[in-house]
Image (cartoon, rainbow, N blue to C red):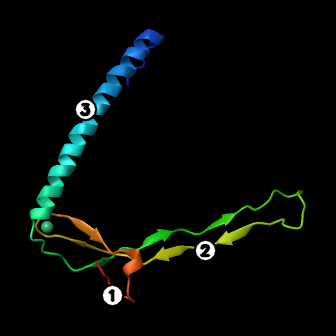
Amino acid sequence: MTSQKILSPFELRFEIEKDESYLKELKVCLQRKRNYLQVLEDKCPHSWEEPVYDPIITEGYTCQGDPPGTMGIDWRGPYHVPRKEQKRWKRTCRTCGKTEYTLLEKLSGTVPVF
Ligand SMILES: [Zn+2]
């Protein structure tokens, strides 16, 4: 809803029902397209490009710890959580555009396993 008009609760309820109905239609349409894409990808003989390193990076941050003035044997001051990098590679099919990622638990050294 983009209009700035002030709606009554009755109008608003009607708008919400209309939007929910439209949303249901969209979800059905979206699922149909995903299923069809899956069929096309399954039929593709796949011609993979060279794998590209594409790690999952979680930036480091400083955790504030317990508020000053609080006490206790387990009190924790501010501490730094380091940046984390999980190794991952991706490859894309030249023919259909499908992208696959390495399975993190299947990495062997620096060789990507798809
Ligand atoms: Zn393909």
- The vertical placement of 25 against 42, above or below, is above
Residue at image location 26% in from the left, 35% down from the top: 26
Res 80 quadrant in image = bottom right
Location of residue 37 in the rendering, given as x and y in whole percent from the top left corner: 16, 54
Asked whether the residues under the numbered discs 2 and 1 touch, taking CB atoms below 8 Å apart as contact, a structural biologist would say no
Res. 8 visible in picture? no
Residue at image location 22% in from the left, 80% down from the top: 50
Q: Earlier in the sequence, mark 2 or mark 3?
A: 3
Residue 82 marker? 2
Q: Which residue is mark 3?
A: 25
Residue at image location 42% in from the left, 16% down from the top: 13
Amino acid type for the residue under numbered disc 3: Glu
Q: Give ligand 1's quarter of the image.
A: bottom left
Dot 1 beta carbon under 8 Å from ligand 1: no
Question: 113 or 79, which is in the foreground?
Answer: 113
Residue 93 is left or right of residue 2, and the answer is left
**Quarter placement of the N terminus:** top left
Q: CA distance from mark 2 to mark 3?
A: 45 Å
Q: Which residue is mark 1?
A: 111
Amino acid type for the residue under numbered disc 2: Pro
Residue at image location 43% in from the left, 10% down from the top: 10
Mark 2 or mark 1, whichever is nearer to me: 1
- The vertical placement of 40 against 49, above or below, is above
Residue 114 is left or right of residue 106, and the answer is left
- The vertical placement of 33 against 106, above or below, is above
